[in-house]
Image (tube, rainbow, N blue to C red):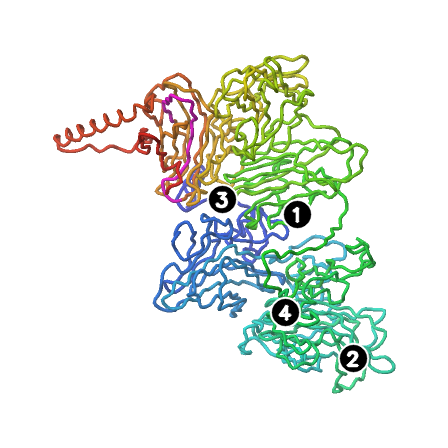
Amino acid sequence: MSLPGHLLPALVLLLARSPGWAWVPSRCRAPREAVCNFVCDCRGCPDEAQCGYHGASPTLGAPFACDFEQDSCGWRDISTSGYSWLRDRAGAAPEGPGPRSDHTLGTDLGWYAAAGTHRGRQAATAALRSPTLHEAAPSCELSLWYHVASGGVAELRLELTHGAETLTLWQSSGPWVPGWQELVVPTGRIQGDFRVTFSATRNATRRGAVALDDVAFWSCGLPTPQAHCPLGHHHCQNKACVEPHQLCDGEDNCGDRSDEDTPTCNDHTATDFERGLGLWNHSEGWARNRSAGGLQHPAWPHRDHSRNSAQGSFLVSVAEPSAPAILSSPEFQASAPRNCSLTFYHYLHGSEAGCLQVFLQTRSPGAPQAAVLLRRRHGEMGAAWVRDRVDIQSEHPFRILLAGQTGPGGVVGLDDLILSDHCKPVPGEPAGRPPAPPRPPLSSLQPWNFCEPGHLFCGDLCVPPEQLCDFQQQCPGGEDEQECGTTDFESPSAGGWEDASVGRLQWVRLPAQDSGSPGTDASGAAGHFLSVQRAWGQLAEQARVLTPTLGPSGPRCELHMAYYFQSHPQEISCNFERGTCGWHTGHLTDAHWHRVKSRGPGYDHTTGQGHFMLLDPTEPPAQGPGAHLLTWPQTPAAAQECLSFWYHLYGPQTGTLRLAMRREGERERHLWSRSGTHGNRWHEAQATLHHPQDSSAKYQLLFEGLRDGYHGTMALDDVAVRPGPCWAPKRCSFEDSACGFSTGGRGLWTRQANATGQAAWGPPADHTTETAQGHYMVVDMSPQALPRGHVASLISEEHRPLAQAACLTFWYHLSLRNPGTLRVHVEEAERRQVLSISTHGGFAWRLGSVDLQAERAWRVVFEAVAAGVERSYVALDDLLLQDGPCPRPASCDFEAGLCGWNHLPWPGLGGYSWDWSSGATPSRYPQPPVDHTLGTEAGHFALFETGVLGPGGRAAWLRSQPLPATEASCLRFWYHMGFPEHFYKGELRVLLSSARGQLAVWGAGGRLRRQWLEGQVEVASTAEFQIVFEATLGGQPALGPIALDDVEYLAGQRCQLPTPSQGDTAVATSVPAAVGGTLLLLVLLALLGLAGRRWLQKKGGCPSWGKTDAVAPSFDNILFNADHVTLPASVTNDQ
């Protein structure tokens, strides 16, 4: 039955509003084989959304990952017993056996998959299965982090099922190491659908607590069809492009095997050992075997390389170093001037003593010559088949010899030996004639001795493995400590360093004259060093080089090394759209800056859709305090240069972003810094670079991000440098410099901190950090420094002309003894006074503000006029220039910022901050869609995300400037709470803070409607005080925002009760004017309560009161004693 055209839109809207159904228009209908294939075939990547991928199209090399923060990413429990998997987090069960934090965030608020929350009566297996995935490239790797929290776990297993076969990718029976452990396994090429299962088997009567987090598939997508391929690349039959080295390598890189079925490959000779040894029929110590039905050896390959199957065949050996296994090729004709190339896949697992060597043995006209070592792979390579290749040019007939050996528990394997078309066997060679035994270099074989395997024979001693490289000499000649990492790389053994790379890069020992650059070794001589070079591996990209097993070591053990980076000088100016220009990330920390593309809550400054540099301490989780972003050494273009950039500091636990300059032979010089969140928006900053006159000394710039937790990010964009000085900065905290302020030649104003507590004058802490380590500007106003009536001037650099009216705010601190007068002047064409402050001082920093208009360049001048009083001073801190008029004290619509409201974390509350955002700005945290002032997405508000709170942090404060005592004043504000219905709730409270303590005067609980509500409270205080908005929780952590807007403080005015037509309003009754009358009020309330209760009892019942949004202020949470005040629970450290 067809519907009338006018009913169809209504039906669509009706369905869209139905629970559990959402209509999302999409023009992309990916075929089944394109869903969950690790490739974003549709814009926005909806074809991968059901298999764990969240976000926009990934950049090249980005993993398809699941951190369990939003959901289970399609992974589901398939356990058949009570021992099963569920999505969990540490904060939900703080006393349980599981981890104390997740791996993604490193906090008790992060999510993971967990098994083993209940004890069982019998052994059981918990299985967690991935969604159905489709097609995996040969380079595909699966990484995950697991945590075993108890000894009841008998086994962990990772399996891959495709078709009728289930492959064991990894299994372990312990012993288990405390903390989160990383596992990386290659999947190999998978055709068609497959699923991955992670299972844990527990012992009987044990919990078997296991957790799983950060599951990621790396480099798993097959190449996509292209109209044209880059020069030299192969165009597959399915229109994909592959690199030349991927042709005829035994792997299906195209996805349709057309890179292995080309005419070129037909001339190659491949041996996959499925039906025998092929050309390699001279074998000693090698056995042809397969995984299925093979030896029960812990390190045995679970699959071959050719078929990626347990049914496939390969060569394997457990030969000891004293009798290595030898595999020999037939004799080949001389190949020069062409290359005879051998591509092969090797397996070294289970022992650090495992070794595979490739030798070339030539036959000269006289007799066979000694074998020459072409390649040596040594150590633990993991349970993976690793590709390698050797190219041979020989003027004489030759053989290729492969020698394998391993230590106790180890296995060495070979598969897929592929000879190129220029490897031509000598015609008529007798098939049964064995080759001459290889004669490898003496360094590759141990001398004859009577010691056990693995022991070192020196003199009359047998040194066991645990005493080798333990920094204590056992042998008379020190042989047990000779190849233990200490080296200048002049010896061919490289001091025991061994390349352990399995990807496209490797470490190679090179002579300086062959390297091109740097041309010398670290000592300046033509020696040797290790250098990163291209390699033939197909797995992880990073190059790794390892020492032998060292230690144990003492607490003062240090590693010293020289390193060299080769690059081309590039520009500092950069918008990061096409790369990082002249910037690079530092390598001395585990946190790193990343160039990322705008997506989701992260957006760049240039276009809103481009690239920028991001520091996120959760990707990957950082253990160290910070990360560095540096330029290459630069030559100054002028004596003064102006560096401008845009920065973004956002999150309730943001740390410090710092800019510094390095110059050879000088101390690092701090130029600029910002701490804490600065709202969900980009800010511009500038810093003048001062260079020595007539100096060509190069310099480096350094951005250092210092984290203060995991709930906050830092970003940089649009960096530019130009000749000449910068305009005066709009913001100055004096933390790193005096911001260009001059003192008129007299030097009376000084920049100082009181970290030692020995400062002769000045406040004990600054305003920026509220610590003794913070800096401020101060002038000594005592008569001997500045006689009565004399003036000390502090003059700014030139500010750019103002396009509109602006507000200059600053914080000042006056000594208790009358210091005199602080005057503020604006110097444009002439100097004019705009503010004068001559009140007595106190213990607090106070906010000053000046409305400004200037059509030309201008300066601000602070003048301190002395009163001639001993031990007096004037201090300044935190200057800020913002567009728009100055707001009234403690009032703010948050359109231009926080208006002097302080969001610095209060000690003891957990170190979290209120933030500043708008509905139109993408955010990683939930927030109101519109503000209250404008009622649009463009409007701004103050915001706090309570989901970060937990056992380590219980509240966050937003504090006003100090306000004078008042008998009655009205505080009005609008607030928003976005907590899910029937879930945990947040709380917003208003406190009055003074020298006498904190007093709660208003409060509202969560589970409120997602709309703006009005609140008002009448406040009174007999002493100077601050208004504090406190965001806290009434239950367990939950994702939910608390927002504030349109805060208005009406000094000296009583609140007017709202009329019913004013809508939803939360009103608090007035507060007693004096704390001294509190006891009397409590007594009266108690008497009234008793009288009311008796009256209700006489009436026969008690009426039921409905829930209201308002909470009347009371003093229940404050106890007044004779000599002290007990603070409320939310502001103390007691739980």
Amino acid type, mark 3: Val
Residue behind mark 1: 586
The span picked out in magenta is 1015-1036
Q: Which of marks 4 and 3 is nearer the N terminus?
A: 3
Which residue corresponds to mark 2? 331
Q: Which dot, 4 or 2, sits closer to the camera?
A: 4
How many other residues sit within 10 Å of disc 3, few (<14), some (14-19) or many (≥20)? few
Query: Which residue occupies the foreground of this view, 46 or 459?
Result: 459
The secondary structure type at the circle numbered 1 is: loop
The crowd level at tag 1 (other Cα within 10 Å; few <14, some 14-19, many 20+) is some
Residue occupying the far right of the picture: 365
From what the image shows, is residue 515 above or below residue 908?
below
Rendering quarter of residue 305:
bottom right
Residue 333 seen in this snapshot:
yes
Q: Main secondary structure of the magenta part?
A: strand
- Checking the image for residue 468, the label placed there is 4
Q: In this view, does 877 lie to the left or right of 858?
A: left
Report, in whole angstroms, how far the alpha carbon at label 4 lies from the one at label 2. Answer: 41 Å
Residue 162, horizontal then vertical, whole percent: 53, 66
Q: Is mark 3 on a helix, strand or loop?
A: loop
